Image (cartoon, grey):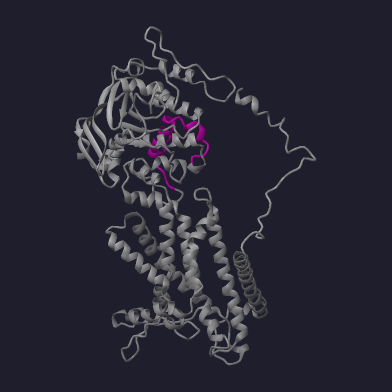
Amino acid sequence: MAIADLTPNAADRAPAPPRGSVIARAPRQRTTAWPLVDRVAYALCWAVGVGLCLIALAIVLFMFFKGIAYLRPHLFVESPAPSAVQSQSGGFLDPVVGTLIVAMLGIAIAMPVGVALGTWLAEYGRPAWLARAVESVIEIIAGAPSVVLALFGLLIFSQGYLGFLSQTAASGGVFGRSFFAAGAVMAVLALPLVVASTREGLTRLPDRLREASYALGRTPATTVRRVLLPAIRPDIATGGVLGLGRIIGDTAIITILLGTFLDLEKVGSVPVLGTLRGTGSTLTSYIFSNSPAGEGNAPGKAYAAAFLLLMIVLILNGIVTWLTNRDGQSDGGGLSRALRLLPLWSRLTWR
Amino acid sequence: MPPPVRRIAVDRDPYVAPPRPAGNGAVPASSVATRLRTARTSSVHARERMRVESLWLAYGDNWVVRDVTLPVRQGEVLAMIGASGSGKTTLLRSLNRLTEITAGAARSGSITLDGQDIHGFEVNDLRRRVTMVFQQPNPFPMSIFDNVAYALSERPGRGGRRRRRSTAIEEAVTDALHRAGLYDEVAGDLERSALRLSGGQQQRLCIARALAAEPEVLLLDEPCSALDPISTATIEELIVELRESVAIVIVTHNLQQAFRVADHVAFMHLGELVEYGTSEQIFDRPTVERTREYISGAFG
């Protein structure tokens, strides 16, 4: 019989089994038959998952209510002022601007370097010993506590020949603290995430894409530039946003390399360059300084700033989710890509 | 294993497999075949473009192509048939030196294009003259227009997403799409992502891309194996049409397809060229026993 006879027209087809039919569904998996040890372990896993959700929820809710209570519009437009009285210590305009500057500087350095490194590792990687060495170095950077990176950065940027990037004291000593210094070290912090996502994206691309390009007489370099990198734009963007999140959330590098004053201190009279050479603060150092542990002791403002910071990070996470979900056609969905990045991400953020 | 293409019947007219029972959705294969074969012009004016001369090819220590000598002529289609592992794809890939991207590939013997050794060419110049279409449709993840424009030797104008295009590029792209028989289907929106096309359209886009480089030889590596019968028929007609302007080499597992499109057929087995001849001769009067066995489905 021809196949056509077996497939009736859509109109003739019944939409579902007749009413009253017994419909069997897959039974829920039960653990009652499991060994006791497995059941206990299963319950623990479940409890840990729920517990983590509760903690995260508690943090967000706590910050939300505390933050909303203290968040006032004027905080966004006033500079911090040194005062022991909370009502006179100004707002967090400078820290917000500082956060933006550091994030932009850091990501502007990390993106090109990271994409270049990731591409080299995935597409060329010769000589092999050098590629292995670079991989190890990136692992080390990814695993290094940011305070160590900060200390090393201070050492570098205090060198006399790098004095033009920060402030030089009358005695000739170089402070080594500036937006330039903090931004550069922040770039190192974000680099592993950009490298990992670029590399991950490139290795996932099928070889037939490369062959198709070679078969048209295109060089490997052209192939990378015009086919491969455009194809992994979402991966690169994801790496960048993850890196941005890490930069915005870091405190150690800011306190060591950007100074302890909360307002922007320019060096010299050149408008933009002066600010970049000067010191300042970010939301993280503002929170630290205003928390009960810091000098400012204005917990209300710390809560408000913490709320703002949390919102920024949550928005960035939302952007990552959106970017990874946007093109789900090629690789089993954005979720799998996000999961592949998760080990690195968790190692970096929850230490 | 596909059914035998034809029964060997010397005293009768060539027998073409009858169409399948109507109503099963398949294209009546023989009507296409008849149409294609009657549309044939004789290949007397075919001109030799490439020549493979005592070619040996190896991956590591494994010699997968052994002492093959073969002409590739413009104005006709050369089909390479043979079981898996017979070296036909490797031979095809060596024609535009794609074998070289595999580590450990080695070669002995010569391949010439218009009398010049292809290993004397700059490799990317060669690959623009001898382009290739692969088994799986592999459009780049960009717009239809950009896919074709990518193969042109000059770059589309700069300027980010909204590219400024010269009319020359526009013309070259539409011309390539016309030649690949895709233009009418996609003319409405050339900015659409190529990944949204159907499998058959994607493969024709890949052919358009390969044609845009203005090649002298077009290599097709099982171009229809991932496609449904309707798309296959479209592409086969296209191949026969293109034959006049470009020399075509096609690797196929589908004997009926080889019979439908090819003027000359090369049968390979375990790296060796067992038999080479006109399509009629190979399918009607194979001189080697192995060829006879293969085309009648006795092994493979």
Residue A234 at x, y = what percent? 48, 56
- Judge left or right: residue A341 versus residue B9: right
Which sits in the foreground, A6 or B147?
A: A6
- Judge left or right: residue B91 versus residue A97: left
On screen, residue B223 above or below A66: above
Residue A319 sits in which quadrant? bottom right
Residue A199 in view: yes
Instruction: Identify the residue at horizontal 44%, vertical 32% (top origin).
Output: B224
Does the segment drawn in magenta span residue A35? no
Residue bounds of the magenta highlight: B163-192
Residue B56 at x, y = what percent? 23, 35
Residue B271 at x, y = what percent? 28, 32
On screen, residue A346 above or below B231: below
Does the segment drawn in magenta span residue B167? yes
Instruction: Identify the residue at horizontal 34%, vertical 32% (top origin).
Output: B218
Task: Tally the numbered discs.
Answer: 0
Which sits in the foreground, B170 or B206?
A: B206
Which sits in the foreground, B73 or B226?
A: B226
Image quadrant holding the N terminus of chain A, namely top right
Judged from this view, the residue extending furthest toward the right is: A20
Residue B158 in view: no
On screen, residue A125 above or below B113: below
Residue A20 sits in which quadrant? top right
Residue A117 at x, y = what percent? 36, 62
